[in-house]
Image: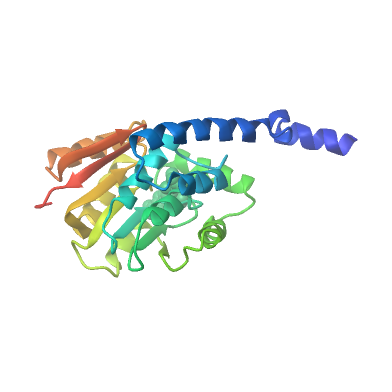
Amino acid sequence: MLLLDERVFRMGFKTFLGIKKRSWKRSAKKFIAKVKRTFPQYPWEDFLRISEHFRGRELSSLPERAFLFRLSHDLPSDAKVVEIGSWLGASSCLLAWGLKGTKAKMYAIDNFRGNASDGSARVRYQERMSKLKTDTTKDIFDRNIAYFNMENRVTAIVNDSLQAAKNFCEPPHSIDLVFIDGDHSEEATKNDITAWLPFAKPCGIVVFHDFTSNHGVPQAVWWAIKQSYFSELIGIYGSTIAFKVNKGA
Ligand SMILES: C[S@@+](CC[C@H](N)C(=O)[O-])C[C@H]1O[C@@H](n2cnc3c(N)ncnc32)[C@H](O)[C@@H]1O
């Protein structure tokens, strides 16, 4: 009895009773019903299945993830996507699942150790990793990609973003969508923009997460706007913002 009490205490009473799971599902279904009315052309049941798999471990909201899912689904069938910062693979699975065609490809770039330049971010990742009882999220990432049978579509690159850009196997101007969600300091985000934008197709898409955070992403995005790197704002959902890349960037 004592053991059970301890377990209930540790996991939280609502989790133990399954209340959190049921309430998540209720609000997710409500969200899907709404988004389906506006955007009926997307496979929302798949979106729900993937989101449910990551329930409780996600780092972004449903509307943000739905936006990413739509963006990748709208890409051409041979599209290539680069993601900087993959963590456990929640956004990677959604981006990759949204893609169509056997030639479509996604590169998931992460050191998988939470090695960000900002000390407080590093501590946060380490705390999360210690809860997951690991010092790298790569194994969990791999299991999640395999769970959705996307090993052939997703290539993980275990490296720091800037090093990965130096050794990247795809030519310049070949990537349809770049999702930047790695090191969130202003300098690191600017470096990611400078390193990865040359790989984007003219009129390709660049997406930032944590755009409304107090880390440094908004300052870096504003800097990129002033450099005329973007030609169009595609959309903003929560803390996710997407631009069309300027032809001359
Ligand atoms: C916010 S998480 C990514 C969340 C993921 N996009 C999602 O939505 O599920 C940020 C990730 O970036 C990685 N990271 C931080 N700095 C990095 C860098 N300089 N190079 C590569 N990865 C980095 C961390 O290890 C962490 O896994």
Residue 115 can be seen in this image: no
Q: Position of residue 52 (x, y in %)?
A: 55, 44
Q: Where is residue 7 in the image (x, y as percent from the top left)?
A: 79, 37
Number of callouts in the render?
0
Which residue occupies 57% across, 55% down? 135
Question: Please, is residue 206 above or below residue 171 in the view?
Answer: above
Q: Position of residue 220 (x, y in %)?
A: 25, 39
Residue 137 falls in which quadrant of the image? bottom right
Q: Which one is in front, 126 or 6?
A: 6
Residue 14 falls in which quadrant of the image? top right
Which residue occupies 67% across, 30% down? 19
Question: Please, is residue 150 above or below residue 93 in the view?
Answer: below
Q: Which one is in front, 181 or 184?
A: 181
| Colouring convention used in this rendered image of the protein | rainbow
Which residue occupies 52% across, 57% down? 141
Q: In which quarter of the image is the N terminus?
A: top right
Question: Please, is residue 232 above or below residue 198 in the view?
Answer: above
Question: Please, is residue 231 above or below residue 23 in the view?
Answer: below
Residue 103 can be seen in this image: yes
Q: Which residue lies furthest to the right in this view?
A: 1
Q: In this view, does 157 lie to the left or right of 57?
A: left
Q: Position of residue 21 (x, y in %)?
A: 63, 36
Q: Residue furthest left?
A: 248
